Image (cartoon, grey):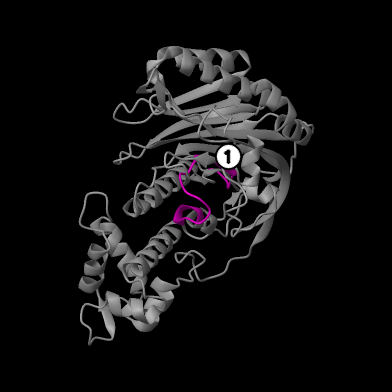
Amino acid sequence: MVKKRVSRVGSYAISSAIADPNCFSCSTFNILAPIYKRLIHEDHACRESEIRAYWLNRNEGILDLLLCEKSSIICLQEFWVGNEELVNMYDTRLGDAGYINFKLARTNNRGDGLLTAVHKDYFRVIDHREFLFNDFGDRVAQLLHVEVIAAFTGTQCRNSQEILIVNTHLLFPHDSSMCLERLRQVYKILQSVEAYQKENSLSPLPIILCGDWNGSKRGHVYKFLRSQGFVSSYDTAHQYTDADAHKWVSHRNHRGNICGVDFIWLLNPNKSRKVLKTSWRDAVFGLLKYHVRRARASLTEADDAFAFLKAEPEADYITYSGFCEALRKLNFIGHPYGLSKEETKELWVQADPDGNGVVDYKEFQQRVWNPTSTRCEEEDEEEEEEEEEAVLGYSVKNAVLYPTEAEKGMWPDDYSLSDHARLTVAFSPVYTNITSS
C-alpha cells in the first residue's frame, strides 16, 4: 500500500524537480517512536514498543517510503535510538542505499532522538556537532557542515558549495507557559550555529533548519525565525503568505487536532540580518504582549498594557521592580525555567535605552509593545566602503507533503506510518549578492 501511493505522489514531483544534477532534496519526518505510539491490543491499552511485529512492520514501511523518495538529506525525529534492532535496521538499509548516518539521543535516557542522513553522492561531510539543550524537555539538535558534490562549479563564489544543516525537535507546548522555553530552544540553536561559524571563520553560508517545531505559523517560534530571515520552504514553493496557516497540515496530535508544525527553513547568506540577540528580545516582548492581553481580556491598546506594567497607578513610567513584578504575575520569572536574572536585565536594557532607570510611555511603545529595531545596534556608525560579493544560495524548486491530503489541510484516516506527514523540498543553486566591507 505504501509503495503504491508513493509511486503516484511526491516522488514524481520531487524527482522531476531534481532532474537537474545541480539540485538536491531534503526530507524531514517525525516517525513517531514506538515507545510513544498508543495501541489497543487484545482489548488492552499498550505501547507499540511492546509488540515487535507492529513496530517492525511500520518502520519497514517508513524506510520503504524514504528510500523510494531518495532524498539527498533525511532528517528524522522521534527515532527510537534505544532499540538496537531498529537502529541496526535503519543503519543497514540507509547505509546500503548510500547514506552516511548520524544519530543523537535525547538526554536523560528518554529513548528517542534524532537521525540525520546525507547521501554520499551529493555531499561530503566536513564536520558534525551535537547540541544538548539540557532543559526540562531534554531536547537536542544536530548540525552537519557539508560540501555539495554536484556538476555546478561556480568559481566566482568564495564559499564554494558548503551548507549548514540542522535537525531538531522542539518541546511540545502542553500549556502556554512552555512557549518561552520553546523560544529559548530556537535561540540556543541559532546561537550554536553562529558560534560554529565564528569558530571556523566561515563566510556566510546557506542554512537549512529541519524538524518538528511543534508550533504552527501562528506561533512565536515561527515569527522569531522569520525575523532572522528564514523562509518556510513549503510556503515558498506554494507561494503562501504568513497568513495562510490553514492551507496545509503536517500533524495530527494526541488531542486529535491537525496543524502544520513540520518545517524545512531556508536562510541564504545575508550580512544585513537582524542581530540574533535583538530578535530574541523582540520575540520575548512579543510573547509578553500576548500574555498581557490574555491576562487582561479587555486589553487591546498599548496604554492599557502600560498601566498594567506600572508598579504605582499614579506614576507615568515603569520601574524595573514594576517590570519584574509584571513578569512574575505572567509566570515569566520565579521558576527554574523562566527568564534568568541576566535575561530579565537584558530585556530591561532594551526597554530603557537611555539608562535612566525608568521606561516612559514613548519608550514602552517603541521598545516593548511595538519594537522596530531591525539592524545591529553594535554596528559602527562610520560607514566603510562596501562592495558586492557573489555568494551561492539556494532557491526552492518544489515541496510536497505525504500523504497528499495534508496539502489540502486534511488528514486521511487510512494513513498509519506516523502521526506526522513527511515533508520533502527540492533546492536548486542560485547566486545572490551581499555587501562586504
In the picture, residue 189 is in which quadrant? top left
Q: Quadrant of the N terminus?
A: top right
In this view of the protein, can residue 159 be seen by the observer?
A: no
Work out whether residue 251 or residue 160 is closer to the camera in this orientation and state it: 251
Work out whether residue 321 or residue 310 is closer to the camera in this orientation and state it: 310
Whether the magenta-drawn stretch holds residue 21 is answered as no
Q: Is residue 390 above or below residue 48?
A: below
Q: What secondary structure is marked by label 1?
A: loop
- In the rendered image, residue 75, in percent from the top left (x then y), is placed at 54, 31
Q: Amino acid at mark 1?
A: Trp
- In the rendered image, residue 71, in percent from the top left (x then y), is placed at 65, 28
Question: Magenta residues?
Answer: 202-222
Q: Is residue 372 above or below residue 337?
A: below
Would you say 15 lies left or right of 117 here?
right
In the picture, residue 325 is in which quadrant? bottom left
Q: How many marks?
A: 1
In this view of the protein, can residue 434 be seen by the observer?
A: yes
Whether the magenta-drawn stretch holds residue 219 is answered as yes
Q: Residues within 10 Å of mark 1 (few under 14, many from 20)?
A: many
Would you say 10 lies left or right of 191 here?
right
- In the rendered image, residue 240, in percent from the top left (x then y), is placed at 66, 54
Q: Residue at x 79, y 31 (%)?
A: 19
Q: Quadrant of the C terminus?
A: bottom right
Q: Residue furthest front?
A: 43
Work out whether residue 413 or residue 139 is closer to the camera in this orientation and state it: 413
Q: Residue at x 45, y 56 (%)?
A: 220
Q: Which residue is mark 1?
A: 411
- In the rendered image, residue 47, in percent from the top left (x then y), is placed at 38, 23
Q: Residue at x 20, y 57 (%)?
A: 334
Would you say 150 lies left or right of 351 here?
right
